[in-house]
Image (cartoon, helix red, strand yellow):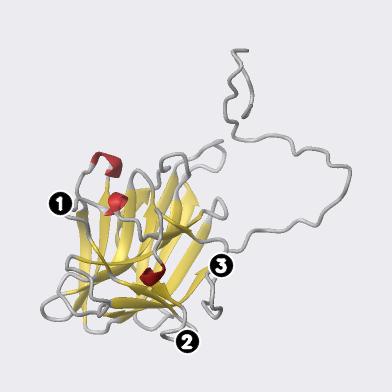
Amino acid sequence: MIGIDYDKNGIGEPVSRYKKPNVNKKYHVCNPATNDEFNSTKLGLQWQWQANYKSEWISLKAHKGWLRLYSQPEPQGYKNLFEVASLLLQKFPAPQFTTTTKVLLTSEHTGDKAGLIVFGLDYSYIGIIKTETGFKISQFICKDADEWNGEEEVDFIEVNNPLIYLRAEIKPENGDDIIPKVLCSFSYSLDGKTFKRIGKEFIAREGKWVGAKVGIFSSTNYETNQKSFADFDWFRFE
């Protein structure tokens, strides 16, 4: 039985909060891992792939101290990232937080991209994208992604440097609500010190059988040859 059987039909319903069980012993309060400096030869246990993963998607040895995500090809008839397995995500660690990552895009093709994403049935991300003349930083939003709707590019700015810092700020709209709307805003930095907002606020939404997640990805609209990839130096929460 899961949760509380409100109508006594033998089927439990999920609850938003509940009393911890008495296990007759005291344990220290500890939090699951969140930050990752990518200095290990294995991913931290906090990371979850969107779907069944393949070992050739990543390397923690190719660029020591960085996580390399090889740009995975978008599926035929691509609509949005909901159908992409190679999203590297983790659960929201708190009701309010900021997460920042440092990424270097090495690209062979126009349209190759890497980004920081807040993911669910609706999702939004800030990404660095290879263009014909250089690179651009863009914010995209996709509504009802599970219904195969396309993405909307909300805002972009052209840049020359493929090394960029990406940030997402997460906060509840009203902290008094049991399940408040969760607002997400994105920003970027060229030096890791001064961040500039881009695009517009986005309301996070749950996924299928899971809550909203935050994470990273690297994709291409070409057949993969592992010549395009994104290196992430670290992924940090505040």
Q: Position of residue 5 (x, y in %)?
A: 63, 19
**What residue sits right under mark 2 in the picture?**
64
Residue farthest to the front? 55
Using the numbered discs, state the Cα–Cα distance from disc 3 to disc 1 in whole angstroms.
33 Å
Q: Position of residue 230 (x, y in %)?
A: 33, 76
Q: Quadrant of residue 194?
A: bottom left
Answer few, some or many: residues within 10 Å of disc 3's Cα (few below 14, many 20 plus, some between 14 and 19): some
Q: Residue at x 36, y 61 (%)?
A: 86
Q: Quadrant of residue 195?
A: bottom left
Using the numbered discs, state the Cα–Cα distance from disc 1 to disc 2 in whole angstroms.
36 Å
Residue farthest to the left? 132
Q: Mark 2 and mark 1 in contact (Cβ < 8 Å)?
A: no
**What residue sits right under mark 1 in the picture?**
77
Look at the picture and state if 209 lies above or below 189. Answer: above
The amino acid at mark 2 is: Lys
Is 184 on the left or on the right of 225, as rendered?
A: right
Q: Earlier in the sequence, mark 3 or mark 2?
A: 3
Q: Residue at x 45, y 53 (%)?
A: 213
The amino acid at mark 3 is: Gly
Is 80 on the left or on the right of 234, as rendered?
A: left
Q: Quadrant of the C terminus?
A: bottom right
**What residue sits right under mark 3 in the picture?**
44
Q: Secondary structure at mark 2?
A: loop
Look at the picture and state if 69 lies above or below 12. Answer: below
Q: Secondary structure at mark 3?
A: loop
Is 129 on the left or on the right of 176, as rendered?
A: left
Using the numbered discs, state the Cα–Cα distance from disc 3 to disc 2 in whole angstroms.
16 Å
Q: Position of residue 108 (x, y in %)?
A: 19, 80
Q: Residue at x 62, y 29 (%)?
A: 2
